[in-house]
Amino acid sequence: DAGITQSPRYKITETGRQVTLMCHQTWSHSYMFWYRQDLGHGLRLIYYSAAADITDKGEVPDGYVVSRSKTENFPLTLESATRSQTSVYFCASSESQEQYFGPGTRLTVT
Amino acid sequence: GNSVTQMEGPVTLSEEAFLTINCTYTATGYPSLFWYVQYPGEGLQLLLKATKADDKGSNKGFEATYRKETTSFHLEKGSVQVSDSAVYFCALRRPPGNTGKLIFGQGTTLQVKP
């Protein structure tokens, strides 16, 4: 199906483990973004990418790593998960003004 | 710096009531302004946008006017429905030449009761 998908939709992991959240879009949009959504904070930008092999930090990048080897994929890795990274994570893509969001991944770190 | 401030929620209304959700912004230059809506369990969807002063964005009965003099982009709807219950986010995009990043407000939860 066309669009932007995220996997997994739900994930429970333990403190200290590495976890990767996947994001895939079928539009060949140049820009891709990762946000986290927490009560009282709205959406905060973690990392973004302007094209394959081009990534840059957002507002809250610490503890996260991204890569973009292909235009359609933009995985987000938590190298050593902490409880403060419990959140809902949204991926988005864009070619112009509008950003299109995936359905989100709810991550719980125990 | 650039920022977006929304009224705190939740906002609780009865069906067919008039809705206003306030949004003010701080930005250099002439940003584009957006309202996104998030229905329960879903990602955000663009509701409407305005790209220059005095523009009015509209969609699904919702409206917002880009007011540069008051740096505001308030969301309004004349008669809300239960199906409008959602979280609403105001956002800005800095002028061209930037990477297209959006800056979001904290979101306002709307609950519409029958």
Image (tube, grey):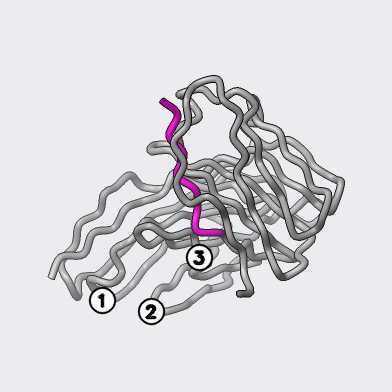
Q: Give neighbour class at mark 2: few <14, some 14-19, many 20+ (Cα, 10 Å).
A: few
Q: Is residue A99 above or below residue B28?
A: below
Where's the C terminus of chain B, which quadrant? bottom left
Is residue A108 located in the magenta-colored stretch of the structure?
yes
In this rendered view, identify the residue nearer to me: B66 or A61: A61
Q: Horizontal and vertical percent for residue A28?
A: 77, 67
In this rendered view, identify the residue nearer to me: A73 or B87: A73
Q: Which subunit holds the residue at mark 3?
A: B
Calculate the distance from the C-alpha at mark 1 to the C-alpha at mark 2.
Answer: 8 Å
Q: Horizontal and vertical percent for residue A42?
A: 46, 43
Q: Which residue is mark 1?
A: B79
Q: Horizontal and vertical percent for residue A64?
A: 65, 31
Q: Give neighbour class at mark 1: few <14, some 14-19, many 20+ (Cα, 10 Å).
A: some
Where's the N terminus of chain B, which quadrant? top right
Circle 3 sits in a helix, a strand or a loop, which is it? strand
Residue at 26% across, 49% down: B10
Q: Residue furthest left?
A: B114
Q: Amino acid at mark 3?
A: Gln
Calculate the distance from the C-alpha at mark 2 to the C-alpha at mark 3.
Answer: 15 Å
In this rendered view, identify the residue nearer to me: A78 or B92: A78
Q: Which residue is mark 2?
A: B61
Q: Which residue is mark 3?
A: B45
Q: Which subunit holds the residue at mark 2?
A: B
The answer to whether the residues at label 1 and label 2 have Cβ atoms under 8 Å apart is yes
The disc, 3 or 1, on the residue closer to the chain's N-terminal end is 3
**Left or right of A69: which side holds B80?**
left
Residue at 70% across, 62% down: A94
Q: Residue furthest right?
A: A53
Calculate the distance from the C-alpha at mark 3 to the C-alpha at mark 1.
Answer: 21 Å
Residue span colored magenta:
A102-110
